[in-house]
């Protein structure tokens, strides 16, 4: 499901009309004004008829694979999602209906588990953002075709250098508009298509549209599209996702390392060892797949670690070599 073409042409219609304010009066200029008016009317007609012109747009909801109702995701510290724009987001803490994230550039944020609702707190090197909303934290969830919801969101941004404060107020209207089988660098996923339009609380004008392609299999969106009336459209796609064991409790890390070491020491290629956390919320299958020697003569092995984190499946590929002096296995890739 893409941005509805009528929305697109109505935005273009408004742009064309705004151009009239910058055309001076006069005999020659009047002819120019008439041409702009005609162009605006054509755009408006396209908006009414629903014709398509943008690669991001489609005229009707796209119904893809049949998918069961999807519950609100639950996250565990250590899960991460990396996109083709260079951003990587890692879960650092979970508390009731909120989750804290850290990206690879050092920014920290806290938001509802429901990712459709913007950040409640965001801190970067250049700004601090605080948000407040009247949204139900479970808006749209459990996900099912036709679900709709709307909420207001007020965002205050403070620049760290100048202390300048900017407030933005928006009304969000979201709906589950379809399902789609999506191919991204991270793989192929069956997704729910969630479209959110946001409007100015002052003028009521459409200020932008965001479309999420959510995969219940990994508990996050695999693609996001952003469109604004006066800006270039943007799209981000999932490159990889996984689980960082360094955010496990120390005892859990030690237990996992012991299991991995035994697998690397004794398992033939293709034979898996399994591990479970004490809470049983996380399980892992550790599979050596290739044995070889480094240029220095050390024993090395490539292995896969497949994690099931509250039903989210994450796969990592790793290589480790055994230090010839200490006898310890060290990761090399």
Image (spheres, rainbow, N blue to C red):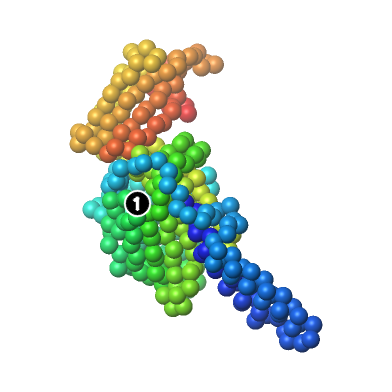
State which quadrant residue 232 falls in: bottom right
Q: Residue furthest bottom?
A: 26
Dot 1 alpha-carbon crowd within 10 angstroms: few under 14, some 14 to 19, many 20 or more: some
Q: Residue furthest left?
A: 279
The residue at which mark 1 appears reads as 145
Between 85 and 150, the one lying in front of the other is: 150
**Residue 263, above or below 75:** above
Between 100 and 117, the one lying in front of the other is: 117
Image check: 172 left or right of 29? left
**Residue 122, above or below 203:** above
Image check: 242 left or right of 48? left
Residue 281 makes an appearance in the image: yes
Q: Position of residue 123 (x, y in %)?
A: 41, 60
Q: Residue furthest front?
A: 49
Q: Residue at x 51, y 56 (%)?
A: 59
Q: Residue at x 23, y 33 (%)?
A: 277
Image check: 273 left or right of 315? left
Element class at badge 1: loop
Q: Position of residue 132 (x, y in %)?
A: 33, 68
**Residue 74, above or below 164:** above
Between 41 and 263, the one lying in front of the other is: 41
Q: Position of residue 25 (x, y in %)?
A: 73, 86
Q: Residue at x 33, y 19 (%)?
A: 272
State which quadrant residue 177 falls in: bottom left
Q: How many marks?
A: 1
Q: Position of residue 167 (x, y in %)?
A: 43, 73
Q: Residue at x 47, y 27 (%)?
A: 332
Residue 165 makes an appearance in the image: no
Image check: 74 left or right of 155? left
């Amino acid at each position: 499901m893409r941005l509805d073409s009528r929305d697109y042409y109505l935005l273009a219609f408004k742009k064309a009309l705004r151009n009239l304010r910058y055309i001076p009066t006069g005999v020659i200029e009047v002819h120019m004004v008439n041409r702009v008016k005609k162009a605006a009317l054509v755009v408006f007609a396209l908006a009414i008829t629903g014709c398509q012109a943008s690669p991001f747009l489609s005229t009707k909801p796209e119904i893809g694979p049949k998918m069961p109702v999807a519950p609100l995701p639950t996250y565990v510290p250590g899960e991460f999602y990396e996109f083709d724009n260079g951003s990587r987001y890692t879960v650092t803490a979970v508390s009731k209906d909120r989750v804290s994230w850290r990206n690879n550039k050092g920014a920290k944020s806290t938001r509802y588990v429901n990712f459709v609702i913007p950040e409640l707190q965001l801190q970067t090197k250049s700004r601090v953002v605080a948000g407040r909303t009247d949204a139900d934290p479970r808006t749209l969830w459990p996900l099912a075709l036709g679900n709709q919801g709307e909420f207001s969101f007020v965002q205050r941004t403070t620049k760290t250098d100048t202390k300048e404060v900017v407030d933005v107020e928006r009304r969000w209207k979201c709906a589950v508009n379809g399902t789609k089988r999506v191919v991204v660098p991270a793989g192929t996923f069956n997704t729910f298509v969630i479209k959110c339009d946001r409007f100015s609380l002052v003028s009521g004008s459409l200020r932008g549209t965001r479309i999420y392609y959510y995969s219940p299999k990994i508990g996050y969106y695999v693609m996001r599209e952003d469109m604004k009336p006066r800006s270039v459209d943007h799209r981000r796609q999932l490159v990889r996702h996984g689980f960082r064991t360094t955010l496990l409790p120390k005892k859990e890390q030690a237990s996992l390392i012991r299991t991995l070491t035994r697998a690397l020491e004794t398992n033939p290629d293709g034979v898996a060892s399994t591990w479970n956390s004490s809470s049983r919320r996380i399980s892992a299958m550790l599979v050596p797949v290739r044995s070889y020697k480094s240029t220095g003569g050390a024993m090395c092995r490539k292995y896969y670690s497949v994690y099931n984190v509250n039903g989210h499946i994450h796969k990592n590929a790793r290589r480790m070599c055994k230090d010839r002096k200490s006898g310890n296995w060290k990761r090399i890739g």
